[in-house]
Amino acid sequence: MTEGSASCSPAVKENRNLLSELGVVQVGVAKWDMVQVGVAKRGAAQVGVVAKRPGGKKRPLEEGNNGRHHHAYKPRKRRKAPAPPQSALAQLNEARPGLQYRVLSRRGPVHAPVFVMEVEVSGQVFQGVGSTKQKAKLDTAQRALRSVVSVVSVPAVLPPTAASGARRGAAGATSLSAELSADYTSDQLAAFADHALFRGFDGPPGPAGPEDGPPGPAPLASAVPNGIAQCYDAQVPLARPPASLDSSPCPRNPVAVLNELRPGLRYRLVSERGDGHAKSFVMALAADDGTGRSFQGSARNKRRAKARAAQAALCALFGLRPDSHLSTQATPSGGLQLHLPQVLADAVSRLVVDKFSELTDNLSSPHARRKVLAGVVMTTGADVTEARVVCVTTGSKCISGEHLSDRGLALNDCHAEIIARRSLVRYLYSQLECFLSTDSPSQRSSVFRRRDDSLGFTLKDDVQFHLYVSTSPCGDARIFSPHETHMEGQGDGPNRKARGRLRTKMESGEGTIPVRCGDALQTCGDAQTWGDAQTWGDAQTWGGDRLLTMSCSDKMARWNVVGFQGALLSHFTEPLYFSSIILGSLYHSQHLSRAMYQRICCPLEGLPCAYTLHRPLLSGISNMEARQPGKAPGFSVNWTLGDHSLEVIDAATGKDDLGRPSRLSKHALYRRWTRLHCKLSSTLRVQTPATPPATTYRDAKQAVRQYHDAKRVLTHAFHQAGLGAWVRKPLELDTFC
């Protein structure tokens, strides 16, 4: 027995005996000429065995393999990392070697210097700025490439300053093919050095750069690299890249994208509101283009607020929005559009939210609690900065049937959108009173002017009203999943059959239910009875013993046909429509457009000549509003331009805490209409045979025949489309004087 065998343990000997019985011969670790058999662990020393074929012969070697067997695991080939993209400086140097860059000036403090450099290319001088000489040199090269690469396409809706800046950026640049890429950071662009891209430098020189000063960054999407443009939707037309330069899009953080396009921008914390789990942060950044514009973003944490501020800046400066589905894009208006959709939507949202924060002491008031915020903003031209907030409201509940008032002293529907319309009507009454006053400044400040036929009034030119709602209105506009992105016709969701149907609000809670098809009440369109509306029934039954109120989506759809002015104001004015409807969250273009006007068959036969199916601009905002935590409060607040403070209304009773009627009640608005009717009886748009003291509220409304004819046509269209019939309130609610 050898020394090695003598040192073997009993366990090793037992394993050798077992292997011998199985017909397996052990081999050494270093001999791996045969196929490995047995169980081995990767990364450790492996002891293999060679299997014997039946009859005791070894497995023959495979031919064509130099006497070696194939191993079970083959080494993976390492993929070469893609080469880093060339900078604009390198690409320009390849196209025009030997360019000389000169430092023009150095300004600013020692810790934050600003260098200005210039380079001359074929007679054209380009300047750039940066915090270091290297950055200034790179910026100069980017501007030189941008002036030739960019295919400038200025839309008609750009502000005059942006259009003039775009024309200055295009000066001296030759016209290029539409298929040429605007990506001056791509390393593959060097292959096109002999293309018309770089031959543009040989063209006739345009206006020299120093005469106009250092060129500011042009707010054009065409100057954005393709790698960024493919991750974002450009609102300004982009130059299409050739197929060989096309790269797959990837999601990009807006902060990183903005830092690449505009390095050095600083973010600051504007405010921190709320406490605990309900905190809200507002971050802002200022543009470095000399305009002094500031962009804000709000969210539950600073990181997301910073990203939303950067997203707003990308949209305004470069016309870029995150690559999104069609469901999040704005639906253009069917009428006059004076503003860029996203700029208008963000401005309207910011104005309403800031006004509500001001009225509630920076959201510290107990009345700042809300689920839905709504407001109306008025613009008097193309300049959004001159817009004014007309009203701000909150609320998400309706009155109980037992608190109905037959004298018009209670608000029946305290949802924010409905209260906002009533506040706007109240504001229009005050504007008519200003027009009729003897004070000349008050007359000039009114939004109304007389019609050309001297019968009634109309809004002044370019006066538009924009409705903002912090979330999608209840009813048909909210019957979808928040994560749904596909087109409406695809899929078979549980609510697919109920979409488009008229819906009613629940009396003592949030949510809506479809109107009952086949019921005699719904088929004939009769009003609810006073006894049924005042009876409190079982919440789980479908009985007619509860007060039924049409959903906000259905009421807003009716405003797009008959106008938001209502029947009483129709005595004085022509139909008035919202120019835009803007949502702060839960915006879905297909569902909102269906709820607002697409479910209504067009054209509406029999519609009076003064009325039409209006299609307002529908849009979401860049910084989607965060969901409001907690239970919905039982009160509603309203404020109208000219009021000193908020009015707080108990949603269950339709009155304030002391039982006093609201300034938006039917009774209050009817009193103001009566005073105006006496002054304007000879120049009314609608002539009524009865005098105001002898008429009831219902008679005054019924006197406007065209308005009610338009309502009747719309109600018939809903019924004919199988969407149900409109539910009306008890007639006793409108019989007061």
Image (cartoon, rainbow, N blue to C red):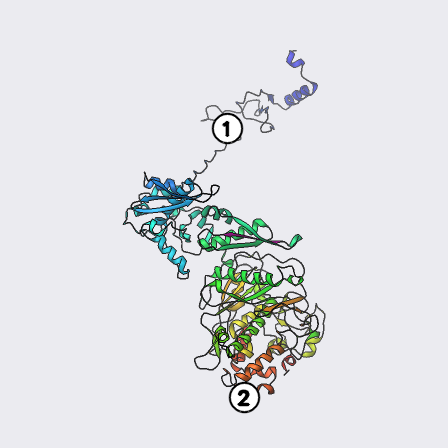
Q: Quick check: can you spot residue 300?
A: yes
Q: Nearer the viewer, mark 1 or mark 2?
A: 2
Q: Which mark is residue 523?
A: none
Residue 440's place in the image compared with 92, above or below, is: below
Decide whether residue 336 is among the magenta residues. no
Task: Where is residue 436? Give x, y as percent.
Answer: 51, 79
The reply, left or right, for residue 165 in relation to residue 426 is: left
Amino acid type at mark 1: His
Residue at left 67%, top 52%? 276
The Cα atoms of the two marked residues, 1 and 2, are separated by: 105 Å
The reply, left or right, for residue 540 in relation to residue 188 is: right
Residue 457's place in the image compared with 597, above or below, is: below
Between residue 696 and residue 285, name the one nearer to us: 285
Instruction: Provide the residue span drawn in magenta.
Output: 279-292
Contact, CB < 8 Å: mark 1 with mark 2? no
Residue at left 50%, top 64%? 618
Between residue 673 and residue 336, name the one nearer to us: 673
Extreme-left residue of the structure: 204
Please identify the quarter of the rendering in which residue 537 is found.
bottom right
Quadrant into which the N terminus falls: top right
Amino acid type at mark 2: Pro
Task: Where is residue 364? Give x, y as percent.
Answer: 65, 59
The reply, left or right, for residue 319 in relation to residue 194 is: right
Q: To which residue does mark 2 refer? A: 689
Which secondary structure, mark 1? Answer: loop
Q: How many other residues sit within 10 Å of disc 1, few (<14), some (14-19) or many (≥20)?
A: few
Residue at left 48%, top 26%? 62
Q: To which residue does mark 1 refer? A: 70
